[in-house]
Amino acid sequence: MDIKLQADEFALIRRWVEEICGISVDDRKAYLIENRLAGLVAENRCASFGEFYQKFKNSCPPALRERIIDQMTTNETLWFRDTHPFTIFREILLPSYCQEIAAGARRSIRVWSSACSTGQEPYSLAMLLLEAMRNNNQLKRGMIDILASDISDSALAQARSGCYDKIAVNRGLPPEYRSRYFSDEKRLWHVAPEVKELVRFEKFNLQDSFARLGSFDIIFCRNVAIYFAEKFKRELFAKYARILNRAGILFLGSSESISLYSNEYDMLEHNKGIYYRVRK
Ligand SMILES: C[S@@+](CC[C@H](N)C(=O)[O-])C[C@H]1O[C@@H](n2cnc3c(N)ncnc32)[C@H](O)[C@@H]1O
């Protein structure tokens, strides 16, 4: 039996989903909730979305909560997505950090991939850092910290495993990087230990306080804020600004812009790629 989402149920479930993970489903996208959650409603022996809401809203088992998050998040990602952020990282940011290291003005590089999905974003950064280390012996492994976090358990499980099928491994990964940093076992491609060791994965909800995370030189917040309500976007960019180091950098997705939500950043451009520098 197909379980249909009624208008009054949509209002309740939409608010619940937003409370859990910040994802705001607008009026025209009720079908997203219907398509993605109907299976869970049936599995939990509820005859309607309304019954599901009444049964679990105030006492949701953690495992069910995680399933709701996994269903409602979109984990689309690929290696070196949109190219520009990674070019800017390699051509502008890394050389300037390396100069500071050589001058004794910097001891570490801290990067946060704050909605890392299945790991392609932080591992792409790790590969660029390994390339930079090959050419610069002052840049050492111990100086680098890449924190990669996401709210989705299933995305993080794949990210931590570092294993990708043939389709995933080929999306955006240059062949020379595939042969240098991956091994092929039983039709799965495994990220090399030297890449994995540079990345620390953690489950993290962007709605939570950033206080315990420390400060960062670069934050990637790519293709995630598009799912959030305006108010949450404003709060999020303000929270990033607080934990970015002086002149720290924020990268957004190629279709995203900060101008409506914050005036704490300067917009910079390099070869048509846009990035943001915190004003402090
Ligand atoms: C479309 S992916 C983007 C992945 C990567 N940043 C990229 O640009 O390729 C969006 C990710 O944001 C995560 N996400 C959604 N809401 C979140 C939240 N409140 N806190 C942390 N991560 C969240 C999802 O689980 C998903 O993996």
Image (tube, rainbow, N blue to C red):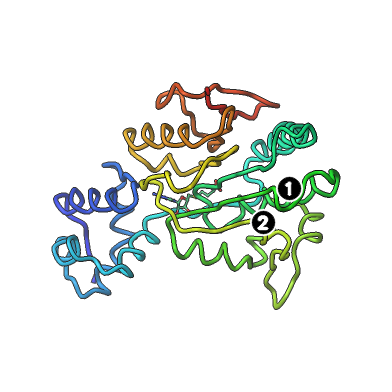
Percent of width and height locating residue 138:
81, 43
Q: Is residue 201 left or right of residue 178?
A: left
Type of amino acid at the residue the image marks with label 1: Leu
Q: Quadrant of residue 247?
A: top right
Residue extending furthest toward the front: 104
Residue of label 2? 198
| Mark 2: secondary structure | loop
Q: Is residue 55 left or right of residue 153?
A: left
Q: Residues within 10 Å of mark 2 (few under 14, many from 20)?
A: many
Percent of width and height locating residue 213:
48, 47
Residue, x 72% and y 75% (percent of image)? 185
Residue of label 1? 129
Residue, x 44% and y 48% (percent of image)? 212
Q: Quadrant of residue 228?
A: top left
- Taking depth in this image into account, of 119 and 166 the one nearest to the observer is 119
Circles 2, 1 touching at the beta carbon (< 8 Å):
yes
- Taking depth in this image into account, of 30 and 51 the one nearest to the observer is 51
Percent of width and height locating residue 12:
18, 51
Cβ of mark 2 under 8 Å from ligand 1: the answer is no
Q: Which quadrant of the figure contains the N terminus?
A: bottom left
| Mark 1: secondary structure | helix
Q: Residues within 10 Å of mark 1 (few under 14, many from 20)?
A: many
Cα distance in 3D space between marks 2 and 1: 9 Å
Residue 191 image label: none
Type of amino acid at the residue the image marks with label 2: Leu
Percent of width and height locating residue 187:
69, 74
Residue, x 36% and y 59% (percent of image)? 69
